[in-house]
Image: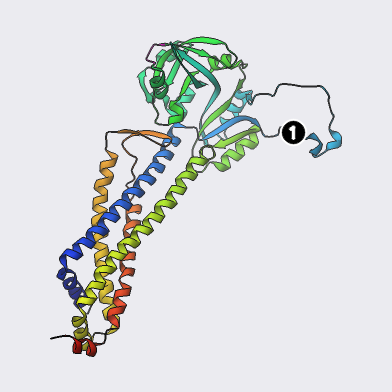
Amino acid sequence: MLKTLFNIAVRHLLGRRRQTLTTIFGVAVSTMVLITTNSLTRGLLDSFIETIVNVAPHITVKGEKMNPVPVNVVAADKPEAVAFVENNIKKQEREEVVNYRQILGIFGSPEYRKLVLASSPYVESQVMAVKGSRNQPLLLKGVLIESEDAISGIRNKLVRGDISMYEKNPNALLIGRTVAKDMGVGLNDEVTVISAKGKSRQCKVAGIFFTGVNALDQSVFVSLKLAQIIEELPPNKVTGIALKVKNPLDDSELAKDLQRVTGYRCITWQEENESILSLFARVGYIVFSLVAFVGVVSGFGVANILVTTVFEKSRDIAIMKSFGFSSRRIVGLFVLEGFMVGLFGALIGGVLAIGSITLFANLPIESSQGPLTKTGFSMSYNPVYFIMVISVTVLISTIAAILPSARAARLEPVGVLRDSSL
């Protein structure tokens, strides 16, 4: 019986070729657009996570002590043990990690050696860079270049210059490509760096790097010693320590443990980029809503062709029922037609989506996609997204066939045949 219903369904669809092909084409286009849109949003998220995990530190030890002196000393746990000092005004201390080498020793201990793969102390400073008539505020970051390379792979990110040139010159700079473009700076150019206290230092560009992370490409690397001199920090103090860990996607517990051991605040890359990740989540919800909405529109198209089929094939349906076809089988017939239209349209749309995704991924256009800069668009080929959209489309098309099939099942053979001109 299933074979008979299938043959009748094929005849019904082929009997209205133009309308059937138009509906299948509409379902295919909507499926292609949905898969491509979902691939773009998910691809951007996957690319962002992959880039951050490969370039940025997984955990950052900040120079913020976790047991600071309370602002309201009266509200302390033991207010009777607090002494009040009058007329003692001091400058607020900067956030910095003291005796950082001891903390690096903790990361190298047997307990954490397998969990913390690399550590890089750094000093951050807001400076003004001057080149000729151009000046620009920059984030200057002092690092130990070998340790930083273990975190971000900066050696392989150089588009011009060489690390050896940087290591030979104590006043050398590694400049992000965005900074180089904005200031018109090239290799071996002299740049004046002015600190927040007004002291200037003449530096030389030893390399230009490009990571794809916009925030990083707008910064400048110098040696750790030079940054300490600019910030007037003693040799035992740094701004923070960047860490690369074994499990970057599950590092919250390790961060809490390191925070307890070191006494300094430890922030994961998820916390650093919380706003961006939440934005991606909201975009994902919007795309999911779009999938449902366009799927419903496709369902209306499927329902339309089946309503027309029921109207035009009323006599055939009456004859089928007079030959013993039950109402349940009539319903199954038109549900099968809706399923076939949705399936063929969704599969064709999936094939078209592969082509559109490949086209967008290989466009020779450098675009700034949120926090990243990449050539071409970040697209995802994850088959889960294909299966999800195709399944939703087929499901909606099948459900859309229920209403016209119910109408067909209610037809009375005697009344239809009496009213029709045979």
Residue 383 on image: x %, y %: 32, 52
Residue placed at 39% from the left, 31% from the top?
A: 212
Residue placed at 29% from the left, 33% from the top?
A: 365
Count numbered badges in the picture. Answer: 1
Image quarter where the C terminus lies is bottom left
Q: Residues within 10 Å of mark 1 (few under 14, many from 20)?
A: few
Q: Which one is nearer the viewer's eye here, 243 or 309?
A: 309
Q: Quadrant of residue 390?
A: bottom left
Tell me if residue 304 comes above or below residue 417 in the rendering: above
Q: Quadrant of residue 386?
A: bottom left
Q: Does residue 336 appear to the left or right of 147 in the view shown?
A: left
Q: Residue furthest right?
A: 80
Which residue lies under the disc numbered 1? 71
Q: Does residue 376 appear to the left or right of 20 in the view shown?
A: right
Tell me if residue 192 comes above or below residue 332 in the rendering: above
Residue placed at 34% from the left, 60% from the top?
A: 295
Q: Which one is nearer the viewer's eye here, 149 or 295?
A: 295
Q: Is residue 73 magenta?
A: no
Residue 291 on image: x %, y %: 37, 56
Tell me if residue 228 comes above or below residue 255 in the rendering: above
Residue 257 on image: x %, y %: 61, 39
Residue placed at 41% from the left, 14% from the top?
A: 206
Q: Is residue 188 magenta?
A: yes
Main SS class of the magenta portion in the image? loop
Image quarter where the N terminus lies is bottom left
- Can residue 135 be seen at all in this image of the molecule? yes
- Can residue 247 be seen at all in this image of the molecule? no
Q: Which residues are magenta?
A: 185-189
Q: Which one is nearer the viewer's eye here, 160 or 17?
A: 17
Residue 388 on image: x %, y %: 35, 57
Label 1 residue SS? loop
